[in-house]
Every structure is written in C-alpha cells, then in structure tokens.
C-alpha cells in the first residue's frame, strides 16, 4: 500500500517538475499568450501569476512491483494513518505512526534504551482553489504545496544532555 502511494507521489512530482520546466521555457511576450494579464490575479507585489494547463491521467502511472512491507519487519514498527482532503491531489495521504516508544531487541521485547522516531519526508501536493475574477463561478486552478509527512520509523540512540 505504501509503495504505491510513494510511486504516485514521485510520479506527481515528476509531472509537476516537467510542467514547471516547460512553463519556464515558454515565451513571455504578450502576443504569445492566449490569456491577458487581466485574467490573472496579481499578487500584492505587482507580479503576474503564470498558469499552465494540467492534465492528470491515472492510466499513465506505472504499477509498482511488489515490495515486502517493512512496517512490521522493522525493530521500530509503525502503522499508517490515512487522511483525506478532497481539495488535494492526491486526495488521500498516508502517514506513519510509530507503535513503540523504544525499539525491539533480538528477543522481540521493547528496549527503552533506544527510541523510535519518525522518518520525515517532504511531498508535493496540488490544492484545488477556486479562481478569482469575473465569470469564475466554477473555474478552479491548482496550487502547488509541500507537506512534511512521516513515511516510516527508525531506531535511534536517545539524545542525552549532560549538565555541568
């Protein structure tokens, strides 16, 4: 389950990177654009917001090969919590939650001399936003956002502060 979500996240990031590269390479002359600057909301600093069309085709995503799930084989096991936000793409994000405060020893018992900590990863998501302006009743655009989510857990030595 986790590997397919990461594949989708990586594919989405690759698509967005290609779109940004293509948008940066496009000419900025007024005769080259189908849209006038009046159609784009100007930020308070006076710059014009450039937009690019986005087409997402789920059939274009490559199915991941089977990978052994690590969450139960780790000495710092975790589970996944799912969150849903229909204004985001992807609409469902899974985040790891460490099951133990310590880590498992070779006998499978929790060792509190070590600590389970989440592994954080930054992911890119698209937020659906209603477009401002005239006649924009059902017009939307997508805003790129980043999220910091836990993707797994790892075992670390505790951080001990020595007093003098």
Image (cartoon, rainbow, N blue to C red):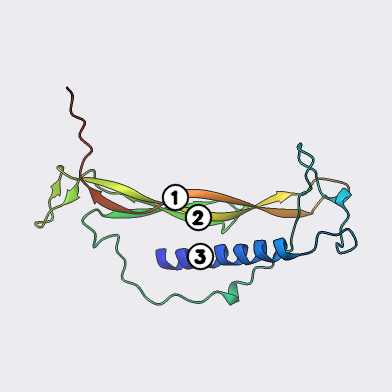
Look at the image and tell me in which quarter the C terminus lies: top left
Q: Is residue 135 visible?
A: no
Name the spot of residue 134 as percent of width and height, x first: 88, 47
Q: Position of residue 77 (x, y in %)?
A: 26, 55
Q: Residue at x 70, y 49 (%)?
A: 129
For residue 30, which quarter of the picture?
A: bottom right
- Give the residue drawn at x 31%, y 71%: 68
Q: Secondary structure at mark 2?
A: strand
Instruction: Looking at the image, tell me whether mark 2 or mark 1 is earlier in sequence order.
Output: 2
Mark sitting on residue 123? 2
Secondary-structure class at tag 1: strand
Residue picked out by circle 3: 10
Q: Quadrant of residue 31?
A: bottom right
- Label 2, label 3: how far apart the Cα atoms are: 8 Å
Q: Residues within 10 Å of mark 1 (few under 14, many from 20)?
A: some
Q: In the figure, is residue 143 to the left or right of 108?
A: right
What's the distance in space between the residues labelled 1 and 3, CA to CA? 14 Å
Residue at the right extreme, as displayed: 31
Labels 2 and 1 touching (C-beta < 8 A): yes
Return the residue at label 1. Answer: 149
Q: Residues within 10 Å of mark 3 (few under 14, many from 20)?
A: some
Q: Position of residue 70 (x, y in %)?
A: 29, 63
Relative to 1, residue 108 above or below: above
Whether pointer 1 and pointer 3 mark residues with C-beta atoms closer than 8 Å, the reply is no
Answer left or right for 139 relative to 15. right
Quadrant of residue 15 within the rendered picture:
bottom right
């Amino acid at each position: 389950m986790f590997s397919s979500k990461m594949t989708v996240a990586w594919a989405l990031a690759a698509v967005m990177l290609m779109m940004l590269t293509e948008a940066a390479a496009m000419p900025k002359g007024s005769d080259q654009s189908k849209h006038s600057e009046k159609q784009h909301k100007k930020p308070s600093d006076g710059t014009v917001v450039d937009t690019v069309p986005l087409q997402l085709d789920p059939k274009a995503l490559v199915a991941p090969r089977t990978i052994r799930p690590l969450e139960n084989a780790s000495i710092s096991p975790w589970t996944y919590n799912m969150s849903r936000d229909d204004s985001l793409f992807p609409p469902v994000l899974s985040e790891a939650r460490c099951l133990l405060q310590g880590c498992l020893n070779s006998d499978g018992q929790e060792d509190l001399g070590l600590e389970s900590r989440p592994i954080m990863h930054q992911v890119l998501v698209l937020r659906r936003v209603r477009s401002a302006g005239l006649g924009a009743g059902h017009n939307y655009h997508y805003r790129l956002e980043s999220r910091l989510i836990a993707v797994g857990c790892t075992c670390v030595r505790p951080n001990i502060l020595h007093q003098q």
